Amino acid sequence: MAQWFAIKAQYPHALVFFRMGDFYELFFADAEAAAAALDIALTSRGEHAGKPIPMCGVPASNAEPYLVRLIRRGFRVAVAEQMDDPKAARARGSKGPILREVVRLITPGTLTEEALLDATRPNLLLALAQGESEIGAAYVDISIGSLETETVGPEGLPALLARLEPAEILAPETMPLGEWEAYRAPHSSSPPSAARARQSVAEAFGVASLEAFGEFSDGEAVALAMVIAYVRATQAGAMPRLARPQPQGKTGRMGIDAATRANLEITRARDGTTTYTLLSAVQRTLTSAGARMLAEWLSGPLTDHEAIIARHDGWAWFLANAATANRVRHHLRACPDIARALGRLSLRRSGPRDLAVIREGLRIADALSAILNEPLPPLLAEAAAALSGHAELHDLLRASLARELPLRLDEGGVITPGFDAELDAERHLRDEARQILAALQATYAERYDVPNLKIRHHAQLGYVMEVPAQAVERLRRNPDLILRQSMAHSARFVSSELAELDRRIAEAAERAQERERAVFEAVVAQVLLKADALAKAAEALALLDVLQSAATLAESGKWCRPEISTDYAFQIEAGRHPVVEAALAGKGTFIPNDCDLSPDRRVLLLTGPNMAGKSTYLRQNALAVILAQAGLPVPARRARIGIVDRLFSRVGASDDLARGRSTFMVEMTETAAILNQAGPRSLVVVDEVGRGTGTLDGLAIAWSVLEALHGQVRARTIFATHFHELARLQAELPFLSPHTMRVKEWKGEVVFLHEVVPGAAGRSWGVHVARLAGVPKPVVRRAAALLDILEKRGAALMAEAELPLFARAQEGLTPEKDPPGAAVLAALAALNPDQMTPREALEAIYQLRALLPGKAEAEGVNILS
């Protein structure tokens, strides 16, 4: 227990898996937390401070499923192993407890095991360091060895976190992480100085200066040092194979803030699932590495024109060479995850099957290299080059490894017979002893007249003679036999002959096992010597997978290669929403729509009823930009898009009650972000600005935001609204293009055609939607009657003059108040007594009375105004 207390003091924030024989034991609060999380028995042993010590355990041979559940529940686990063999310690006369040390701290950001990882998503550890005015970020995925950095301003941190979706974050306690606070790693070490950070990173990679890898800001250097130190600490001093750090600050990615990413559901839906996302709609990848790369492309669309075109050229070549593409797909279907197997090998945490992954991956790489031997576009040519040149290593793996490999090295049979002469000799001795064992079993059965006698191996007793219960008493009288264990239906005996045979077999098997381990480690060392080339081959395989996936999308003819330009163009013909279209498959037809945000009509004002498809139209055009600049096909007949530097989407209403923000406050915060950060190269799609407050307040806000987007921000904009009056601004805003969602009335019913056409809507059909939603009929009828009265009153007011907001606000003046009694006269003029029932007439009288000057205020009634 003294050992346990010492280890727990070093890792206070982790559960300690304390190795005791065949089990990992947990004690005190660790045991209570683990027992509850794993639903296993909580027991106790001994006493501490006069109380029993809570305890639970899991078998060491099957610990991984338990670790999976603990890590997914947010726990960190320190694995303390026995550093000595108990038998060897006893042979040396050691009387103290066996030495135990933590060999690994398992945290969410440092996972390497397949069972703990999502095969299709990266698993990033992110470090953040505060620079003078910006934040340095370094992020590593130790499962594949990638290491990248970038610099962001404080306002860009939420967007970075939303794009990366890190599994764990290292950050100063003073740096707020917002909704990512739960991912902050508990660590107490202070960040190093910039100079010390640069030195330590250079030492870690064996170079004289960090500048050998490029230009890094002080914040990036400190973040790099933080992430490397944390990885080293969690791996008990060992370091995985890490690629050279790549500064990403100037690679040209589209800016997408957290709110926009959530609105568009690019890789994750609002409910946390991945089913109805852009990624799920376009994914045709065949490998887990390809799926990870596709998610990365969608999360960070490019703004570099040449890089985008190179990706388009890649999948367009596959589209034009269908036979070659199909051969590539045939091989990719069998392609394993080389990158993650290489990560486990570099940490010496691998099994024989990780070497089999490398062997099979190199076989496929060689086959694909032979297929891609014709003139290729640049991106494919680079991939083909990375796939070749591995023949020597592939030959070594084929010659050394058995065809079928066990899960663990200690199961034996990993190295194929004939590869190593010394191993073959040891195996021969071991196997010869086993043949002797089989002969001895037959001799004993005859000698002691027990036909079903068996010789078995027991972990504690060694080789024993196991006999049925009816023969036990007779054999106990034999002086050559010693009874070692009695059971309900059998018993186990030993003899001097068996003991000697046990020793001979154990020594032969142990020598064979030690030699096989040595040969295995030698093969692993050869693989790691080629680690960088293997990592490039793994990336090339993933790239081929993403490009063939894009070509598969385009094969139907319904997805086009977008024309990417450096101007301000934006023209999409017959565009569709890929996620909605996928959801409608077999159930209905998606109605395509055009979108033209050319410089002379860069602001599209979209009006129309609820449920007509406005939000879908906004999102599909934003998603088209993401797909185009990610280097993928676009669901449209034709698309021409000038590169978008930042994308903003304000679609859908939500609150943030945990931080005390109402729906309207969230809406205004997101609107402010758009107005403060968008520019002429941005794309802005906004829906229902001003919906969360009073009608006139909302109209005023929507109008002023629209004017700002048109005249000051000058971004390409789609502005959806229910304030149909805004369409009349076309005369004052020359680049405004009013459009509406087309609807038809048929026999008292409204038919939504889901078509976007020029013009403005006359009404919102909200009452009709309420009826469709199942609102009780009396409530719907009452709403329709009130709507009729309100519309007539509005018509009467508009007959005399423009809406006061437009008449005064354009001149920057405060609207004048209506003269006393004007509301009553206007409402009275709107009534049609010949068409009113007695009940409606009575209601109208009450409403008119409430409008009398001073009367409404006195009685607290405000029905029409």
Image (cartoon, rainbow, N blue to C red):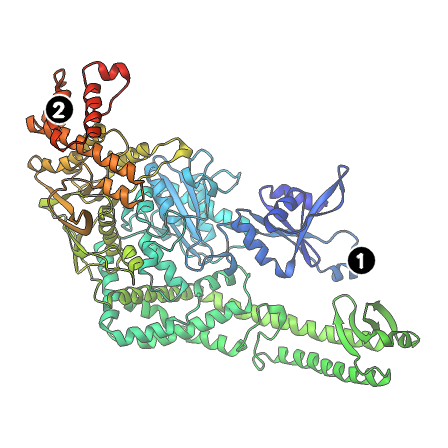
Q: Residue at x 26, y 66 (%)?
A: 315
In the rendered image, the vertical position of residue 108 relative to residue 553, given as above or below: above
Local crowd at mark 1 within 10 Å, few (<14), some, or many (≥20)? Answer: few
Disc nearest the viewer among 1 and 2: 2
Q: In the depicted view, which residue is nearer to us: 222 or 754? A: 754
Residue 93, label in figure: 1
Q: In the depicted view, which residue is nearer to us: 595 or 334? A: 595
In the rendered image, the vertical position of residue 425 relative to residue 820, given as above or below: below
Label whose residue precedes the other's in the sequence (1 or 2): 1
Q: What SS does tag 2 mark?
A: helix
Left or right: 419 in relation to 84: left
Q: Measured from the top left, where is residue 801 in percent x and y? A: 7, 26
Q: How many marks?
A: 2
- Report which residue position mark 2 lands on: 828
Residue 381 visible (yes or no): yes
Q: Measured from the top left, where is residue 372 in percent x and y? A: 30, 74
Q: Residue at x 24, y 22 (%)?
A: 862
